Image (cartoon, rainbow, N blue to C red):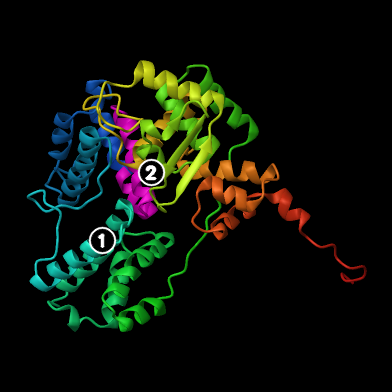
Amino acid sequence: MEAMVDGIGLVVVEALRAAGYKESTIGQYQKSIRVLALLAQKEGGLYTPRLGAEFASMTTSPRTGRFSAQRRFDYSRLATLFDSYAATGQVSLAMSSRGGRVIVPQSADFVALWETWSADMERRGLAAATRAAYGRAAGEYLLFLEASGIASFQAADGTTVFRFLESLRGRWAQSAMWTVVTNFRPFLTFVHRQDLLDALKMAQTRRRHQLVPLLGEREEQLVVQACTHNEVSARDAAITLLALVTGLRACDIIALRLKDIDWRSSTLAIVQQKTGNPLTLPLLAVIIGKLANYILNDRPDSDLKNVFLRSLAPHLAFSDHASIYSITQRTFRAAGLPNTKAATRMLRHHAATKLLRAGTPLPTISAILGHSSPDSTNVYLSEDTDQMRACVLPMPAGAGR
């Protein structure tokens, strides 16, 4: 796990970007990170909670020489994010009250409704990440109603949906608003409020598919070489190769258990965290070798069932995709590719596109990636330019005249 300010800063920025924060907001965080990095020079660039506390106390503006409320918020917030990563290995973006407790609605009606919704999701066996996302969307809407002076859910009308979404645009990037709507819709369905669902539909928040950059052949070779020539630890090599070759999601790499690996058949069998569907994948010999090396020689002694653990005490399992990003980014730096954003989403797209270019049928790719629907694989068609060109019909003679 990263302990240097620059390394943790990369993880924080990736977590903010993955959560849909605006680039302008991320830019403000990056400015604060640069100031923290300057302060950390006296510690050799190492981050500690003590350094974070000192940083958060720097509330005087050097320009005016007076107290700056914005500076206090920015620096205190950044120190909180760094502290959460230093303590748990994950970046917690939860906004807390002064007492450190996550803010929840206060009215009895809203509290009861939110708890009923949470219990229903658990009863239906939704994945933990899904429950968290749906619960957060419902909770933020109820908080918005409460802040608007509405104390009863029956008093909410369609205009509150429009105003709620508008209130989020200052914090969420436009491209991420589809995710907000997707996480919010199940709650409105649960409470049987068709008028609110109609308002959500009228908001016309559309999904945007962004092109994901792929690795070139030379770049892929450099990454594999870094993993196989011991330029990174066996753990980091195994994690990077799993993402690069199999396209496993970060959440599935985190949840991978020792008993999920069949050493004799060189396969792993998991239940996907996102879809709940079973998935069995073959493993290349190099991945099996790195996994065995890590488990036998490097993995800390622990009763935890997870394969991958934090290398620094406490030796807990990873609990956030930002930790996996930190590891893949470190591998790419070792491979001489420091400017490549090696998120598992990009590596997943790379694995899918490689399979597509090799002539693998889409249903097979869908099964390997663990998609709940074969239609989810169609997005990778846009990445294969050669295959798309082959589908273009020739222009009839004289049509261009």
Q: Residue at x 56, y 28 (%)?
A: 284
**Quarter of the picture holding the N terminus:** top left
Which amino acid type corresponds to the residue marked 1 in the rendered image?
Arg
Pick the quarter of the image with the C terminus: bottom right
Residue 19 belongs to magenta span: yes
Mark 2, residue position: 251
Q: Main secondary structure of the magenta part?
A: helix
Q: Measured along the vertical axis of the image, is residue 6 above or below residue 249?
A: above
103 displayed left or right of 332? left
Q: Nearer the viewer, residue 128 or 24?
A: 128
Q: Which mark is residue 123?
A: 1
Q: Nearer the viewer, residue 70 or 109?
A: 109
Q: Based on the displayed image, in which of its 4 quarters is residue 40 positioned?
A: top left
With respect to residue 50, does 234 lie above or below?
Answer: above
Label 2: state its secondary structure.
Answer: helix
Q: Is residue 205 left or right of residue 129?
A: right
Residue drawn at point x = 43 percent, y = 75 percent: 204
Which stretch is magenta?
1-29
Which residue is outermost to the front?
264
Could one spot residue 10 in this view of the protein?
no
Residue 178 at x, y percent in the picture: 41, 64
Report x, y in % for residue 343.
Answer: 45, 41
Q: Residue furthest right?
A: 397
Q: Is residue 379 left or right of residue 159?
A: right
Residue positioned 31% across, 36% down in the render: 318
Q: Pointer 2: residues within 10 angstroms few (<14), some, or many (20+)?
A: some
